[in-house]
Image (spheres, grey):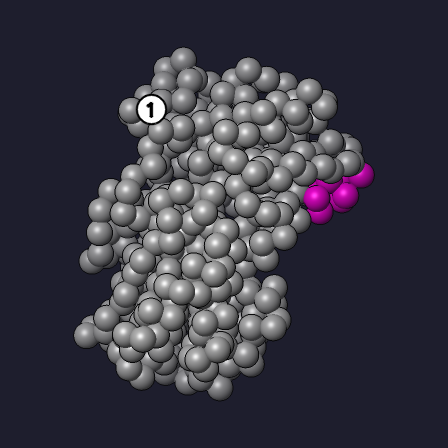
């Protein structure tokens, strides 16, 4: 997951809030490689086709990564973003390093460490590091910056805009900075169709990390997807902590919240809370109910919990980050906010394969997933309707 939640608005220190919802699609998860979609990102965001480096000469590049707060081996957002950057550096014949952020106050310092180290490409991970990334991009025009889960909102001088008016043309003013924005509501919606179809109690739960657009998009897409197949279902929701350093890094609290939901009758749990979410999935396995992972195929990344993970709402983090980093090596880099979703080529969002739980997915359920995917891809289905994907309230 990226990860994040709702209930309080984290505005200070953010570069932008731009994760709306829109069309897109991806293949149905009927085979191990299959995945499904998400929603569009922002009115200012351009649609994406992942850059291809296979037919273009590459130059070696020195790639650095600054993670979001937490740990690198989170089996989710930080780890996958870093793996994509590392794979790109290796393919281009370059080098790679990563700095793991321990506190939000370290963002700028960690970025500067890579600047001082002569890194040519700096990948920063997470919505909250967006402002510091934009400032660094403006101050270092010869370095390429790639922000994962970051829309780029600047004023006419190319300075991060705390009012979110976003009057500046980011691609022109910061031509060395791409903000990667995924459409999380799309895979959330598809996962919701699966969850709503397999629940027996009619009560489901979602556990978020803290209040950022990615978490809200996943959650609202999920709830809308559930209700598309089971209109009377009840979706319980709770954020872990308003402090992102805790919200995404507390498996024990995730398990506690999940256990409370199970006590209220929930028999399907969706985790949207990074490392915290591992506790959610553990609680599901302990009670022999169904879990749904986030950001990556967590049945693969958490094999000890695979027995109860039916699917995961995915961002194609490794592939997308790798492709964008390689675009620097091939001089095909695109600046500004770029939306990666189901309509991207290849699809940048999806739901993962069902693995050991494939028997739960009847042809009718799969047909509903496929039809929804097609609607997300062509834009005829809005995963942020009727419940809107907004950070400012439920």
For residue 207: magenta? no
Q: Does 130 sit left or right of 92 as displayed?
A: left
Residue 310's place in the image compared with 126, above or below, is below
126 in relation to 206, above or below: above
Q: Could you tell me residue 357's position as x and y percent? A: 51, 81
* Residue matched to label 1: 162
Q: Residue 306: percent from the left, percent from the top? A: 56, 74
Given residues 266 and 245, the one toward you in this image is 245
Element under disc 1? loop
Q: Residue at x 55, y 64 (%)?
A: 297
Q: Which residue is drawn at 46% across and 18% down?
A: 173
Percent across and percent down for residue 157 are 40, 13
| Residue 211 sits above or below residue 111 on the image | below
Q: In which quarter of the image is residue 144?
A: top right
Residue stretch in magenta = 86-93
State which quadrant residue 326 falls in: top right
């Amino acid at each position: 997951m990226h990860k994040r939640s709702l209930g309080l608005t984290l505005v200070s220190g953010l570069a932008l809030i731009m994760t709306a919802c829109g069309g897109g699609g991806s293949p149905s998860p009927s085979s191990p490689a299959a995945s499904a979609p998400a929603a569009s990102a922002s009115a200012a965001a351009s649609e994406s086709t992942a850059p291809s480096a296979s037919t273009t000469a590459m130059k070696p590049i020195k790639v650095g990564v600054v993670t979001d707060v937490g740990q690198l081996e989170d089996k989710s957002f930080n780890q996958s973003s870093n793996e994509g950057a590392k794979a790109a550096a290796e393919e281009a014949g370059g080098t790679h390093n990563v700095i793991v952020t321990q506190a939000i106050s370290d963002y700028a310092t960690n970025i500067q460490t890579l600047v001082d180290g002569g890194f040519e490409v700096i990948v920063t991970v997470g919505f909250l590091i967006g402002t510091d990334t934009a400032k660094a991009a403006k101050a270092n025009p010869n370095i390429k910056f790639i922000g994962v889960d970051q829309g780029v909102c600047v004023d006419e001088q190319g300075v991060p805009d705390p009012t979110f008016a976003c009057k500046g043309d980011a691609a022109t003013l910061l031509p060395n900075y791409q903000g990667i924005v995924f459409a999380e509501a799309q895979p959330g919606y598809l996962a919701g169709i699966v969850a709503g179809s397999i629940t027996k109690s009619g009560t489901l739960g979602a556990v978020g990390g803290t209040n950022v657009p990615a978490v809200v998009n996943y959650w609202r897409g999920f709830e809308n997807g559930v209700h598309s197949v089971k209109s009377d279902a009840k979706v319980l929701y709770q954020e872990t902590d308003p402090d992102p350093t805790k919200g995404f890094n507390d498996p024990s609290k995730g398990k506690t919240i999940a256990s409370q939901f199970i006590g209220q009758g929930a028999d399907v749990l969706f985790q949207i809370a990074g490392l915290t979410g591992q506790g959610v999935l553990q609680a599901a396995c302990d009670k022999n109910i169904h879990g749904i992972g986030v950001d990556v195929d967590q049945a693969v990344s958490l094999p000890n919990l695979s027995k109860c993970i039916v699917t995961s709402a995915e961002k194609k983090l490794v592939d997308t980050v790798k492709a964008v980093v390689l675009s620097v090596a091939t001089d095909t880099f695109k600046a500004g906010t770029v939306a990666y979703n189901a309509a991207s080529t290849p699809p940048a969002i999806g739901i993962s394969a069902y693995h050991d739980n494939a028997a739960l997915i009847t042809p009718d359920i799969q047909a509903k997933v496929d039809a929804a995917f097609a609607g997300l891809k062509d834009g005829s289905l809005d995963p942020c309707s009727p419940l809107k994907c907004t950070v400012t309230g439920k």
